[in-house]
Image (spheres, coloured by chain):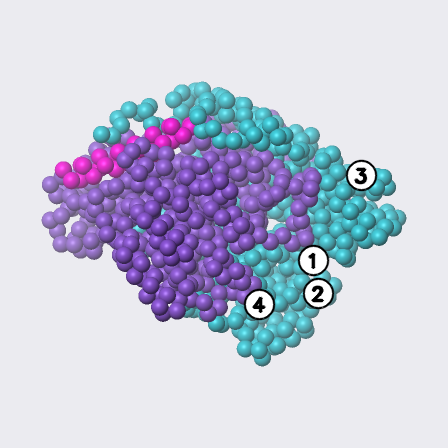
Chain colours: A cyan, B purple
Amino acid sequence: MANDSAKNCGLDPDNWEDFRAEAHRMLEMSIDQLQQVAERPWQEVPEAVKERYAVEASGSSTAEIVDRITDEVLPSHGGNIHPRFWGWVQGTGLASDLIAGMAGAVINANTGGRDHGANYMERAVIDWTRQKMGMPEGTSGVLVAGTSQATVIAFQAARVRVMPQVRKSGQGTTRLTVYAGQGIHNATRKALELLGIGFENLRLVPLVDGQMDLAALRAHIAKDRAAGALPFLLVGMAGSVDLGTYDDLNGLAEVAADEDLWLHVDGAFGAWTRIADAPWRGLSDGIGRADSLALDFHKWMYVGYDCGLVLIADEAAHRSAFAARPSYLEAAERGLAGGDPWFCDYGIDLSRGNRALKVWTALEMYGEAALGAAITDNCRLAALMADEVTAHPNMRLAAPVVSNVCVFTARTDLAPEAQSLLNSEIAQTLQESGEAVFSTTRADGMVMLRAAITNHRSRAEDIHEAIAAVARLAQAG
Amino acid sequence: MANDSAKNCGLDPDNWEDFRAEAHRMLEMSIDQLQQVAERPWQEVPEAVKERYAVEASGSSTAEIVDRITDEVLPSHGGNIHPRFWGWVQGTGLASDLIAGMAGAVINANTGGRDHGANYMERAVIDWTRQKMGMPEGTSGVLVAGTSQATVIAFQAARVRVMPQVRKSGQGTTRLTVYAGQGIHNATRKALELLGIGFENLRLVPLVDGQMDLAALRAHIAKDRAAGALPFLLVGMAGSVDLGTYDDLNGLAEVAADEDLWLHVDGAFGAWTRIADAPWRGLSDGIGRADSLALDFHKWMYVGYDCGLVLIADEAAHRSAFAARPSYLEAAERGLAGGDPWFCDYGIDLSRGNRALKVWTALEMYGEAALGAAITDNCRLAALMADEVTAHPNMRLAAPVVSNVCVFTARTDLAPEAQSLLNSEIAQTLQESGEAVFSTTRADGMVMLRAAITNHRSRAEDIHEAIAAVARLAQAG
């Protein structure tokens, strides 16, 4: 009844020598892309290419596939690999991702559990990061898509700590309240929505000099307690999305201890000033006192998308929020079903890809010193951009640059609405010309240009030329 | 102030020719692994290798990294690439993953949003899948890590439909109830826990011949309504994790329509009988009537980990559960900030890797016919295994094999506890010897051997030899 032929349904290559040759050709094209990245800025995807993405599923030779990927896929990247890309907060990727990507594809690890190398490597990557962040031994962690996922996991652990029955009985009538500074990343709000806590229970505390006002925070908490709510979670910012500012993390840790709150820190990119030089390293002082910390490797560690991490100081709290093993997942003493603990007990996913390998390869290949130097240099470039903006007679910063984010308006001599329009227009024009990628945000009631420099390929001359291009367009506009 | 040297902090290779040579060497080693996969079964990771995973982060040459990955990483895979791996439900991976992996690493796409090729490709992959599943035009979707994530997203969309204020106000006192057949995958329970709905509100409906008893289902719903609960969600199984059985999906769709419930189908692996031959294709009849469908590409489409998909028939319901765009993510008419809709508005993640490329490459390279033939053949092999078990005088199936899952005990002439011990011992011994990988589950009050065949490399002789090995160990035990 079953098929005895090795050819009839096998999907492995019929001719391995052909496959090898084509794979090597794909590798050449891929390395060309990396090497020539400065000459390959973002460009709009041609309509004809979009149409050719439609799935035919009729079967092709490896050679045809390599041709199509070379012609239709490699040029249609998102721009973040280019030296003058500073839009949103996006990492550039690393040559080490290519090495790790090949090995990872043929291992095809499912890191949800069981006893195999990728899980041991993930523990090694997590432990190194824990040490760099200054979190205690025994801290648990799990690699995830990014800080949004990490936030969901951390908040659920925090909730289970104060509501041990919530997995069984649901949120119910307990009104949990949450505190964060104004300008907190939307990941916090989205996580509260998903968990059934509700965003109306998030208190946005005013900032003083870019940091949560601790007196206002304490007042909010007292008011909520008086109204019968259960304050349970304090969210600190290590690198705010709009301006790259940092809360006083030691101050937050003291409030959290006094008020018996779980302290979560959003360190998506900003946590990595831990391996930068002074003065930037000091921005994240106190981060190791968090109960939970969310951070990404794909932003300011430059590793390929996607890879984030949640660290939770109390491993028991972490497990009690997620662990569950039905009979088809029972562990064994020996064999493949060994290898406890399993990562599926620390998060949402039962099937999980191998994110550890690309992080491990980057850490081992470049080393902490080179990665830290790149982060430090990004901060220097943001300061340089701020200097150039400040020196320009007709530009203005939204706020002082404290880390790697620089927000500014290209002309101050127009009405706010006209400045908004001009800044938006400049961002789009520079994206289309390939000269530089800024994104935009709102500050002081208008749209401004925003550069978040998490790009190991950027140099001082890139900053000079980008600001010159902004000035040219501002003058023309 | 900033660094002008192209060498000083850049992480790109200093010497591109060296890097090229080493990358080609990594590719050779990777293809060797693929080609020799039958000779490389799972093996326990040596303690010395585990220790060498510890992150030093002191920097290494590319050559050293390639050596370490070859020696320490490639052999330490999880076994699921081997032709006789049938443990849990794990896919094997494809040679096309290697091609896609190289291109993906140098594009480094963040598919959370913006206007670039990977997002258009993801839409193409989703639309092809929607058509195969028979869901209506206008269905929305988003690629995710796997069915666990897809389940969370679908359930939140279902909840927002009946509780439009839940994102703002939280779950509160509304008691939502959920219905699924006994044996539903744990992903359903974990999602209800995470969302703050609570697993005590999940009703496990008895099965008749492996399918949810529709009369019992209606009785449960009526009882919950009478008690003041709000029944909102019905979860169907297309391929149960323990036995590979399918609910009567058309029957469930009728109950859902009558009772105004959201019908979600867990089709993690089983949805793909849609492209198999008769009679297996018929198992998933009616799947296109689901309000939401969760499925994986990394199981029975053999694509590398991780990649799942959630499809939601009502795009507005999907968006209303997740869409949120703060000012730093505002869309633009032109440039990189164009490309609406953005995938971040359809799920949890704002940063997202490029899962579409490996799926697209597999579909275009192998084609639907070859993928469907592999799925069909896996069902034939499960039937063959069932025949061999049934023909053996001392083995017994837990239940008839309906798709690709075969559960059995290796000896019937022992007390249940002794059968449990023996079956566990056999699973572990065969894993360690490299002869075959079964996992275990509980059925009829004992631990049994379980094969879930989602492996394009398996042949009839693999089934013969594995069952012979089980018989040998059963006799010896």
Disc assigned to residue A207: 2
Q: Is residue A451 above or below residue A312?
A: above
**At 36% from the left edge and 49% from the top edge, which residue is drawn?**
B253
Per the rendered image, the range of residues in magenta is: B366-391
User: How many discs mark residues in the rendered view?
Assistant: 4
**Circle 2 crowding by C-alpha within 10 Å: few under 14, some 14–19, many from 20:** some
Amino acid at pointer 1? Thr
**Circle 1 crowding by C-alpha within 10 Å: few under 14, some 14–19, many from 20:** many
Query: Mark 1 or 2, which is nearer the eye?
Result: 2
Q: Is residue A214 left or right of residue A131?
A: right
Q: Which residue is mark 3?
A: A469
> Label 4, label 3: how many angstroms apart (C-alpha)?
44 Å
**At 22% from the left edge and 35% from the top edge, which residue is drawn?**
B384
Disc 1 + disc 2, Cβ < 8 Å: yes
Query: Mark 1 or 3, which is nearer the eye?
Result: 3
> Label 1, label 3: how many angstroms apart (C-alpha)?
27 Å
Disc assigned to residue A245: 1
Amino acid at pointer 3? Ala
- Which structural element holds mark 1? loop
- Looking at the rendered structure, whether the residues under marks 4 and 2 are on a common chain is answered as yes
| Among the 4 quarters of the image, the one containing residue A91 | top right
x and y percentages locating residue A49 in the rendered image? 59, 29
User: In this view of the protein, can residue A330 be seen by the observer?
Assistant: no
Amino acid at pointer 4? Asn
- Looking at the rendered structure, whether the residues under marks 2 and 3 are on a common chain is answered as yes
Q: Which residue is mark 4?
A: A201
